Image (spheres, helix red, strand yellow):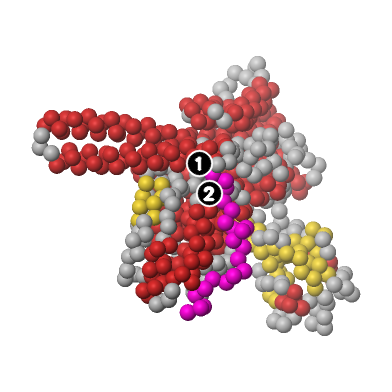
Amino acid sequence: VKTLALPGSLLIGQMLQGCDPFAQTQRSKLQHRRARINQQINKEMLMRAGAENLFRATTNNKVKETVALELSFVNSNLQLLKEELEELNSNMEVYQTDSETINVPMIPLGLKETKEADFTVFIQDFICEHYAEDSSLYDKEIKELMELRQAMRTPSRNQAGLELLMEYYNQLYYVDQRFFSTHRNLGVHFHWYDSLTGVPSCQRALAFEKGSVLFNIGALFTQIGARQDRFTTVGIDRAIDAFQRAAGAFNYLKENFSNAPSLDMSASSLCMLVRLMVAQVQECVFERVMLTTRDTHFLSQLHVAQEAARVSDVYQLVQQTMSQPLMKDYVPFSWVSMVQVKCEHFRAVAHYHAAVALCEHTLSADDDEEEDAQKAFLQFYVNIPAGPPLSHILHDPEKRRKLGKAHLRGAVIRHEEALRVHSLCKILRKMDILQDVLSLTHKLSLEKYSELDHEDDFDETAEAPEIKCKTYPPGGCCVQGPLSLFCARARWGPVRVVGLQWGDGGLGLTLRGDAPVLVAGVVPGGCAEEAGLREGDYIVAVDRQDCKWAKHGEVVRMLKSCSDRTVEISVATLHSHDTQVKNSFVSYVSTHRAVFFNFGVGTPSGVA
């Protein structure tokens, strides 16, 4: 059956390039140490299993005492090895960006390690028995498959590494369809190590292999996200994209893979990882807002404070997930500490910016602007604090100072708690950049507090009210359009530029809404449809003139002014956050559906 042969035009030379296992890079040294410890853990576990069997089988008390002593020694060694591996696998510093800019480090995930596996003989036998063909006709294709598996064990930390894992993942689907019969076990054993504990797992099911590769795809996305330079909007956007895709991969694995043999692929662990990735996305959104907010305007500072409160809240949710019974003893202590540090740090940042907004606010001559400030302030707190109405506080400099002082006191307390938690973790203490961030923000809050602390303040400083978390579009401006379009739960797709020429029936589309204007409908067969415009697109620019915040009438006038020539319209599609987390990895799979080992036609429907 010649149609089973693999097409000859392959990009094998490009796709089979894994990392050089002998290259003395920081990451390769980490992988070598991890592989060595994994082997030692496996050896100790075999020794423990043998000793336990002997202990249960013997009736000789002297032998039992000797075996019990040996078990104690093995368990002690095993505990030390696991602690050493946990420190390696929770090493965040090696995956961070090389940039000299100061950012709070992200939490990446190490890849699962696997033993070599060669199922050449099994596939050859199956071809001979099931397809009644000479298996030697497919030696080249089988060899390339084995080389692909060997290469994917050490993927590079970039797009090429992702492509490598994706290619192997795609191949597993077609191999599963043609060579792994449900009525026959080929006897291929797949050995993978837990990404955090190093505990080995072995299964014959190809689903285990697929699930492990999928896990590594998500883990690689976390490493790519962590290494981005988040001091630029481009770097932040790349980090957001990577962490969202990681969340999508873990969520896809959680929904499609069952009976996980290792704890890192269990539903509870994957749920924790999804929430952790979403929290890191939210942190990147805050950094983007900070990067684009250069002023100390009252509204801008309130928005920054609420963004920071939002980050603190999502990390608090991660912290709760990590404290669940099954996860409590599994998640590395450094991860738990980092999440707690971020929870306290960003809550402190929220209080600091609230104080800046109050203490540097001056009454504006613009009535509309002052009205917007009052509305925003009235919705700033979870519960309205006792005392004078908030509208009175806003117009009284002394009351604003006292409330600002309360916020700064809350900020200092939170900063000190973040520093205390940081000092308790050996791994975090080694991260100088984290120490710099925490010390700098703590110093800023103390300096601001000393400015507001007057000698004649005899009243005890009140406790700052809880800030209501909220998310705003980057830039800290108050938008005219619906907030749902700009919040962090929504994600804009890439901007597309389409060229439209006015015809007898106009442009062939209908518009609706303001800031931004929505393409509500596209006339079938019209020039808009032919140009690639779709219902649900948002117009963000006309002839490269930004119109995201423009009214409906303004956009229509801009389009009509180009009626005598081709007009370029820039549009973007909005994806909700829930849809994005669920489908980000699925969309990545669909766009990289290259078929190497083409033994059949079909589309993978899942891992299990």
Q: Outermost residue, right direction?
A: 564
- Kind of residue at disc 1: Gln
Quadrant of residue 510 in the image?
A: bottom right
Instruction: Look at mark 2 in the image and give the residue it sits on.
Output: 154
- Kind of residue at disc 2: Thr
Q: Callout 1 environment at 10 Å: few (<14), some (14 to 19), or many (20+)?
A: some
Instruction: Please give the name of the residue rendered at 72% of the width and 77% of the height, measured from the top-left corner.
Output: 529
Asked if one can make out residue 196 in the rendered structure from this viewpoint, the answer is: yes
- Left or right placement of residue 129 versus residue 361 in this view: left
Asked if one can make out residue 346 in the rendered structure from this viewpoint, the answer is: no
Magenta stretch bounds: 1-21
- Left or right placement of residue 233 versus residue 90 in this view: right
In this view, 19 is above or below 576: above
Q: Does the magenta stretch include residue 590?
A: no
Instruction: Please give the name of the residue rendered at 48% of the width and 53% of the height, measured from the top-left corner.
Output: 215
On the image, the x and y values in percent for residue 361 come to: 73, 35
Q: Nearer the viewer, residue 546 or 233?
A: 233
Query: In the rendered structure, which disc, 1 or 2, sits on the residue that comes first in sequence?
Result: 1
Q: Nearer the viewer, residue 161 or 316?
A: 161
Instruction: Please give the name of the residue rendered at 13% of the width and 39% of the height, measured from the top-left corner.
Output: 58
Residues at badges 1 and 2 in contact (C-beta under 8 Å)? yes
Instruction: Please give the name of the residue rendered at 62% of the width and 54% of the height, measured from the top-left corner.
Output: 159
Q: Provide the secondary structure element on which disc 1 rests.
A: helix
On the image, the x and y values in percent for residue 78 come to: 34, 35
Which numbered dot is residue 64? none
Quadrant of residue 65 in the image?
A: top left
On the image, the x and y values in percent for residue 202 come to: 35, 52
In this view, 307 is above or below 130: above
Separation (CA) of disc 1 from disc 2: 9 Å
Instruction: Look at mark 1 in the image and give the residue it sits on.
Output: 31
Q: Provide the secondary structure element on which disc 2 rests.
A: loop
